Image (cartoon, grey):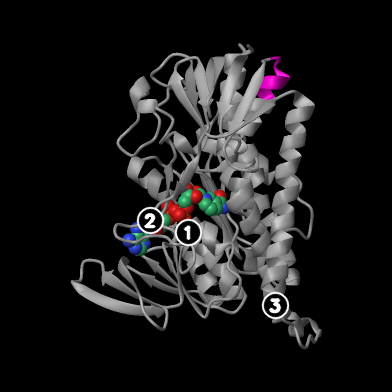
Amino acid sequence: MTTYDLIVIGGGPGGYVAAIRAAQLGLKVACVEGRDALGGTCLNVGCIPSKALLTSSAKYAEIAHLSSHGIAVEGASIDVSAMMGRKDKIVGDLTKGIAFLFKKNGVELIEGWASIPAAGQVKVGDDIHEAKNILIATGSEPTSLPGIEIDEQDILSSTGAIALDSVPEHLVVIGAGVIGLELGQVWARLGAKVTVVEYLDRVLPGIDGETAKLAQRALSKRGLKFQLGRALKSVDKTEAGLSLTVDRVGKDKEEVIEADKVLIAVGRRPVTRGLGLEELGVAINARGFVEVDETFRTSVPGIYAIGDCVPGPMLAHKAEEDGVACVELLAGEAGHVDYNTVPGVVYTDPEVASVGQTEEALKEAGIEYSVGKFAFMANSRARSIGETDGAVKVLADANGKILGGHICGAHGGDLIAELVLAMTKGATVAEVAATCHAHPAMGEAVKEACLDTMGRAIHA
Ligand code: NAI
């Protein structure tokens, strides 16, 4: 019987990337996956299908703005099933691509749900596989609220909200986080009335407050209705559809909202059940995350964990970085992740992208900083493509080292890469500003925001 150097449990972006990298490093590797397809949440029901639908819906929404370009379009219509078919094909092709990469790199795929009966053993079905090391990469799943059961028909998680067969009349989104805003905008663009109900008095918690405000303003302009400071209490099914009761936070007042669909987007929780971790003595924190040290070791020797099931941002690219660093350390190399330079992108229109510290966090920590801002309204490329909403904001320390970058604007998800690289390399705002940026380009706004931290912006 084979003894593997490493068995990875979970074939999402964390697990499959770790498995391939471990194989590249010469380890004998297997990856266990219980779903029919590799790729985890991200490829099957998360990042990729949502971005496919965001693109389709953006193309439809754009038609309404073509008249200012002197283009008239008549009779545009939506075929939701064709849109879903395109999305499913993209997902299918990408997940098959991972299976191909496994073959190419000699990673063995074990199909089924795994548990860990003892350190060094992984059980799948009736089979026990031996492994010197086990890597838990089991990801996360949507949470709901007490008393509210997701049926994926009318009461949806993100999984149901990317698989509707028609455009709802009124979609209520609970939670103005990343999922709520992205999927809310998909259906708003396709013609649904979309109301976003959020507990806090702001959208996108965790994102720089000023940047989140810009996003809220732009999304409101594009049709999303926000009801902040409200908590969902209950959802009742009625003949007409759904009746939602929401509490005004801190006001002892209730409101009723009628809807035909509700998307519950109030966060995700780690998936660890069924693995047998408690019996093994693997330490799990109060919020259900697997505790690990900086080298991804759990409290049980030979068992490691990465990605959404450990504390930290729940992001596919962070899980990948975790996975690579973890197996490089296992193979005796110097794996490392700098969590301060992990970017986050919300793929709404406009996009919201950030890296490093927010202004609120710097204030709270008592760190001195300078701020530079540049609005896309003053950027000539933004003007010519008709994408003037939003701004770039850069935060720098007394020596000009970049502490954080926050962008609300078209292509923000691509523009942030410059600030991520600058932070990774320890570049200063002066060095970014001294770098030649093509003209006319959205990226000039990044340069101008860096100049502005020194009071030297040219076009502001
Ligand atoms: P989230 O944590 O981003 O936002 C949840 C929101 O729900 C918060 O604003 C919270 O205040 C609100 N909320 C909680 N209880 C509520 C209640 N009873 N009534 C009203 N509002 C309530 O969670 P989300 O959007 O579900 O995303 C989960 C994870 O998935 C995040 O960690 C996110 O980073 C990740 N993700 C990342 C994406 C990306 O990088 N583009 C896309 C989608 C998800």
Query: SS of the residue at dot 1?
Result: loop
The residue under the point 40% across, 44% down is 362
Q: Quadrant of residue 227?
A: bottom left
Residue linked to disc 1? 157
Quarter in which the C terminus is drawn? bottom right
Q: Position of residue 172 (x, y in %)?
A: 44, 72
- The residue at the far front in this view is 126
Amino acid type, callout 1: Ser
Amino acid type, callout 2: Ser
Query: SS of the residue at dot 2?
Result: loop
Horizontal side of 214 relative to 239 (left or right) equals right
Query: SS of the residue at dot 3?
Result: loop
Spatial CA span between label 1 and label 3: 23 Å
Q: Position of residue 198 (x, y in %)?
A: 37, 65
The residue under the point 55% across, 15% down is 130
In the figure, 128 relative to 195: above or below?
above
Residue linked to disc 2? 144
Amino acid type, callout 3: Ile
Spatial CA span between label 3 and label 2: 31 Å
Q: Are marks 1 and 3 in contact (CB under 8 Å)?
A: no
In the figure, 99 relative to 123: above or below?
below
Start and end of the magenta stretch?
Answer: 21-26
Residue 78: mark? 3
Q: Position of residue 102 (x, y in %)?
A: 73, 30
Mark toward the start of the polypeptide (1 vs 3): 3
Q: Are marks 2 and 1 in contact (CB under 8 Å)?
A: yes
